[in-house]
Image (tube, rainbow, N blue to C red):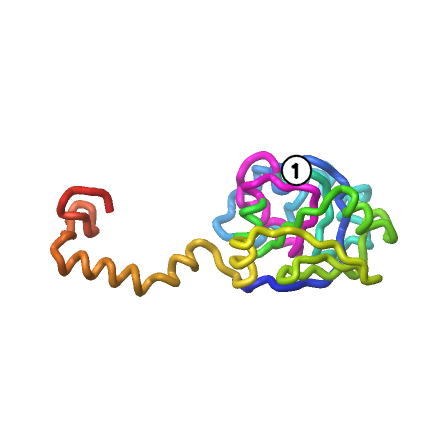
Amino acid sequence: MPGFKSHSGSAAVLDRNHVDTDQIIPKQFLKKIDKAGYGEFLFYDWRYLPDGREDAAFELNQEETKGASILVTGKNFGCGSSREHAPWALKDYGFQVIIAESFADIFFNNCVKNGILPIRLSQNEIQQLGKDSSKQVIENLKVDLKEQFVAKADGEIFRFDFDPYWKKMLLNGWDEISVTLQQEANIKKYEDERIVNGQWEFNNHRGTFIPRDGGSV
């Protein structure tokens, strides 16, 4: 996936706490086998009325919030089940950054693995971030992961902490698989040496190489 270094855009404000993953993407839509196409179901029970029409009262259905690429919300965002479909839906909808007072741990990690930047700011900082804007949208925010700040159009800056490991992963667009594949040559060298030294043998039943001593691979 592409690396994340900085992003500029408007922010939609979802002033709610404890938004769980079933509210982000309801369970009945978890049927696709790829990551695309979930955006239309994001916050489905809040966005739509029982007859399928948009609920005009919902924050993301306001004209001013449409096209927002940053989501500003409350504490404990992404709690509930660990479904990775939640960040898939947010990203497919168009959100690249989520700013919240706090996140559920698994959801936070799933965001990073899918190229979304989750930023923790204090309740006071979030209030300051939107103090000069309408209730629903904050215009012209700049987010910089490398320097770790969020900047308003007037130049006011809010700095955030970010784990160095996840920062490196997100800056480079890496996940655990791509990091492992960087060691592919060393892995192959290790396997070849084990075979040459007679430490591994091919097991027809398993269809793979196993240690001759019966130990774990």
Quarter-wise, where is residue 69 in the image?
bottom right
Q: Is residue 158 found left or right of 163 in the rendered image?
A: right
Relative vertical location of residue 215 with respect to residue 145 in this rendering, above or below: above
Relative vertical location of residue 214 with respect to residue 65 in this rendering, above or below: above
Residue 128 part of the magenta-drawn span: no
Q: Is residue 154 found left or right of 8 in the rendered image?
A: right
Asked whether 95 or 27 is in front, the reply is 95
- For the point 58% across and 53% down, the residue is 37
Q: Is residue 216 found left or right of 159 in the rendered image?
A: left
Quarter-wise, where is residue 21 in the image?
top right
Where does the image place residue 46, in percent across and percent down from the top left?
72, 39
- For the point 81% across and 44% down, the residue is 56
- For the point 62% across and 54% down, the residue is 117
Number of marks: 1
Secondary structure under the numbered disc 1 in the rendered image: loop
Asked whether 150 or 39 is in front, the reply is 150
- Residue range in magenta is 79-107
Say what amino acid the circle numbered 1 marks. Answer: Asn
Residue 83 part of the magenta-drawn span: yes
- For the point 51% across and 44% down, the residue is 31
* Residue at the spot of label 1: 76
Where does the image place residue 67, in percent across and percent down from the top left?
74, 58
